Image: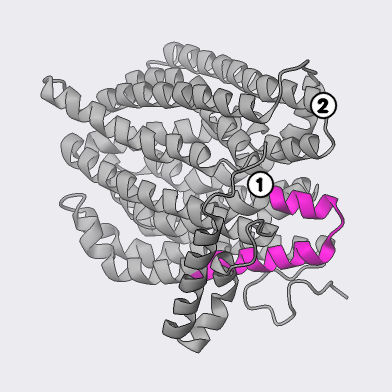
Amino acid sequence: MVPSTTGGHEELGMRSSLAAAAGRLIPSPVLERIAPLLQVIKPTSPDTDDRSAAGRMALVAFSVRVASAAIAYLSQIFLARWMGSFEYGIFVVVWTWVLILGALVHLGFATSVIRLIPEFLATEKLSQLRGLLVGSRVIAVLFATVVAGLGILGAYLFENVISSHYVLPVYLAAVCLPLFTLSEVQDGICRAFNWTDLALAPTYLWRPVLILSLMFVAGLMGADLDATTACVAAIGATWFTAVAQLLMLRGRTREQIDPGPREYHAMEWIRISVPILFVEGFFILLTSTDVVILGQLVSHDQVAVYFAAAKTLALVHFVHYSVRVATAHRFSKLYHSGDTAGLARMVRDSVSWTFWPSLALAAMLMVAGKPLLSLFGAGFTDGYMLLFVLVIGILARASLGPVESLLTMAHLQNYAASVYGGTFLLNATLCFILIPIFGLMGAAVATAFSMVFEATALYWVTRRYLGLRVFIFSRQPADQPAE
């Protein structure tokens, strides 16, 4: 399929004006730091290079995530006020488990398709591509269904052991899992085709709006706005968005790929996907460990306060995610084509695109943190000081850019998995030690320290095996090999 170039000259003119305006208005020291970003809007030709395409994709992804952050943040505020801190805390813990399991039960296909689809397109293995598009989703959903069934069985058998407040929400969360997993894999497929809108909008825009809307309707109908009702709303929103995304994705792939035979190499795909699963799984576990352990050691009210503080910093995380969306499959393309210089430039750009916006957003959120937390309700401003600790870890991760994607696409996922596995164990250990002593601050310190350890270890692995110094303040340019 050949994309239309209608309006190409107008687009180039607009981008030229934007770049010129930026050069006049932005101070020189700042301009030097964001120069890679300005290359995104600098006119080159209608057929822009891979670097500019990656930058634009990152900006689109970040725009979606910013809109999502606003929606999600408002949603959390409304949910906390409607449900009260106790029921809200229960829902937070249950939904966190859905996020963790949803990131694990797809068996790594959500990321492996990002590596395999460009490969199959480049080598014209269209029959394998057709098989992968169907098989990856079927395998992931079937496995998620088995896990959900085991979860329901476990909740039934150990109903007397589980706190009564959690029993029904756990059942409902299990029902949500298969279609949640389908969305995860479809996100990866869309990203591999550069369909950023279809990759992100269902998960980050449609679903939170639907959850909030369904809760509002439930309140109008006189239902109790508790954790159970919130889980029912989450089921409806998740199933609707997954099916809608499925139908839209089917239409786009039919336009992109001609009908034909399918080849299924399930065991080979699983062999590739499972090591990647450990990277993704440990990464998700690391982002959720503090909330899960807090749910076991402190009151639901305190969990809600901590979760609100973490959500306040979510916008900073979105920068890392957005750059990761835009660059992961490009790392794979450059690495496998042997373009070492191009790979180094892309890595250097990705680090700049990640760190400097993250730093700016973190500074703004530190200033606005207390008013934002007060929107959740009385008592939530107690989490304000947590922001200053948590942001240290977030900036440590941002200082390397999406280095975990670089390692995965360069077949170094086992090293990345080892780093994240060790970081997860360190974080869990520190949480169990520090939370009983320092409460919420103990969880924040444990998480921040673990993320600094993670960044240090990933830097060493990248330096050792790829010869790249990816740290934002490294004196040696990222495209210079290690000696």
Instruction: Say what secondary structure mark 2 lies in.
Output: helix
Say which quadrant the C terminus sits in.
bottom right
Snapshot quadrant of residue 465: bottom right
For label 2, the residue is 268
94 w.r.t. 30: above or below? above
Q: Residue at x 44, y 82 (%)?
A: 26
* Span shown in magenta: 329-356
Q: Amino acid at mark 2?
A: Glu
Q: Main secondary structure of the magenta part?
A: helix
Q: Amino acid at mark 1?
A: Gly
Q: Are marks 2 and 1 in contact (CB under 8 Å)?
A: no
Can residue 275 be seen here?
Answer: no
Q: Is residue 304 left or right of residue 194?
A: left
Q: Nearer the viewer, residue 202 or 216?
A: 202
For label 1, the residue is 421
- Near mark 1 (Cα within 10 A), the count class, few <14, some 14-19 or many ≥20, is many
Say which quadrant the N terminus sits in.
top right
54 w.r.t. 130: above or below? below
Reading the chain from its start, which is encountered first: label 2 or label 1?
2
Instruction: Say what secondary structure mark 1 lies in.
Output: helix
Percent across and percent down for residue 394 are 50, 62
Checking the image for residue 242, the label placed there is none
